[in-house]
Image (spheres, rainbow, N blue to C red):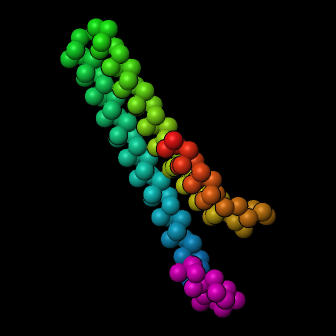
Amino acid sequence: MSIKGSTDATIEANFQLLLKGTDYTLKYKYANAVFNLVLTLVIAGRIWFIGTKTQVLMGYSQQSHIICNKYKTIFAVSLEAGIVYPISLILHAAITGNTNKISIPVDLAPTAIQLAVRAQN
């Protein structure tokens, strides 16, 4: 929609199509960010839950403490890596939605890609 609407924005129908396409894109990005954030929290919560259950089942010994620390590390890594993408989506959608108020065009897609690649390493 936005591509067809941006071909000749002087035509009223194309301009309305451009606005509708931008609106759908922003809604998609916000919904995607919320879904990814919830999914990240569910995965991290499950890892935390398994870590605490393991420690309870094994007793509070030295070995269970080591295993619990491993689960805490995995929990922290998954939480940090999973939150970067929704935050970048929200920022990108907020900036894209307010382009008429910002005088400098900003595109955060390359930054989001770099952050995602660095989070995997």
* Residue at 70% over, 61% down: 106
> Going by the image, does 96 lie left or right of 72?
right
Residue at the limit of the structure toward the front, as seen here:
121
Q: Quadrant of residue 47?
A: top left
Mostly what secondary structure, the magenta segment?
helix
Q: Residue at position x 39%, y 20% from top?
A: 69
In the rendering, at what x and y percent does residue 83 appear?
49, 43
Seen in the image, is 62 located left or right of residue 108? Answer: left
As drawn, 111 above or below 44: below
Q: Is residue 10 magenta?
A: yes
Specify the farthest residue to the left: 57
Q: Most extreme residue toward the top, as rendered?
A: 61
How many numbered circles does the render carry?
A: 0
Indicate whether 53 appears above or below 92: above
Image coordinates for residue 56, horizontal then vertical, percent: 24, 16
In the rendered view, tell whether residue 17 sits above or below residue 107: below
Q: Residue at x 58, y 47 (%)?
A: 115
Q: Residue 70's x, y, as percent?
A: 38, 23
Residue 45 showing in the rendered view: yes
**Image quadrant in which you'd find residue 57:** top left
Task: Where is residue 80? Give x, y as percent.
Answer: 50, 37
Question: Does the image show residue 91?
Answer: no
| Residue 38 falls within the magenta-colored stretch | no
- The residue located at (25%, 23%) in the rendering is 53
Q: Is residue 88 left or right of residue 50?
A: right
**Magenta part of the chain:** 1-15
Residue found farthest to the right: 103
